[in-house]
Amino acid sequence: MRLLDILNRVPHFLRSFYFLTGLAFLVWMVVFDANDLLKQYEMYQKWHELQTDKEYYLKEINKVKKDRAELLSSPELLEKFAREKYIMKRPGEDVFILVPQEEE
């Protein structure tokens, strides 16, 4: 008798088959599914991190394109870049590379 009184206090729409099935489905999707809320949050964080990386790399690409355009437009800058980066020299020229000595 006590259980029947408790069930009678619960509104009818909360006891309906469709409501209980929908609630069970919702609980399953939120807690037990392979793409539950925790996974969704982790994937959102990863997506946000990738978007930040994408912005950084796009800026770097633009910077490299600008540097490349400057190098190709000026023979003096191209020669300076080749000498510093690739240790190139003119024919008949001697290049001495000074390497700082490591202190122990």
Image (tube, helix red, strand yellow):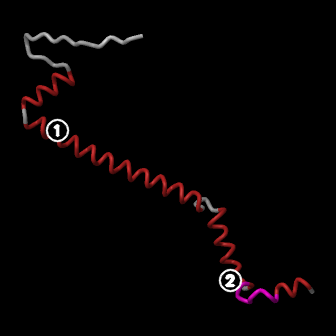
- Residue found at x 32% / y 45%: 57
- The residue segment tinted magenta is 8-14
Circle 1: residue type: Arg
- Residue found at x 32% / y 11%: 101
- Residue found at x 82% / y 89%: 8
Q: Is residue 43 above or below residue 82?
A: below
- The residue at which mark 1 appears reads as 68
- Residue found at x 41% / y 51%: 50
Mark 1 falls on what kind of element?
helix
Q: Is residue 18 magenta?
A: no
Q: Is residue 102 above or below residue 18?
A: above
The chief SS type of the magenta part is helix
Circle 2: residue type: Tyr
- Would you say 16 lies left or right of 35 here? right
For the residue carrying disc 2, how many other residues have a C-alpha within 10 Å: few (<14), some (14-19), or many (20+)?
few
- The residue at which mark 2 appears reads as 18
The residues tagged by marks 2 and 1 sit, at their Cα atoms, a distance apart of 65 Å
Which quadrant of the figure has residue 41? Answer: bottom right
Q: Is residue 95 above or below residue 15?
A: above
Mark 2 falls on what kind of element?
helix
Which quadrant of the figure has residue 84? Answer: top left
Q: Earlier in the sequence, mark 2 or mark 1?
A: 2
